[in-house]
Image (cartoon, rainbow, N blue to C red):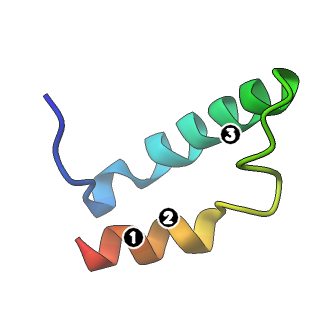
Amino acid sequence: MIRKAIHDDFLQAVQALEVVKKYMLSEGIDQWDQEYPNVKVLIQDIEKG
């Protein structure tokens, strides 16, 4: 099931984001990199709902 993230999801979201960014870069996909998205962006998105 897909739902909006809440503050309790933050650590898991950070971990998932890092795994996905590394994978994407290894595949030559530079849509996401080490700079974006980042922890600040995740916090802002969670707060927006």
Residue at (46%, 40%) from the top-left corner?
12
Residue at (66%, 63%) from the top-left corner?
38
What mark, if any, has residue 18 been given in the picture?
A: 3
Question: What is the three-letter code of the residue carrying label 3?
Answer: Glu
Tag 1's secondary structure?
helix
Gap in Å between the C-alphas at discs 3 and 1?
Answer: 16 Å
Q: Residue 40, image x and y in percent?
A: 59, 74
What mark, if any, has residue 42 been given in the picture?
A: 2
Tag 3's secondary structure?
helix
- Image: 33 above or below 48: above
46, 29: nearer the viewer:
29
Gap in Å between the C-alphas at discs 2 and 3?
Answer: 12 Å
12, 1: nearer the viewer:
1
Tags 1 and 2 in contact by the CB under 8 Å rule?
yes
> In screen coordinates, is 13 left or right of 18?
left
Residue underneath mark 1: 45
The quadrant holding residue 16 is top right
The quadrant holding residue 19 is top right
20, 43: nearer the viewer:
20
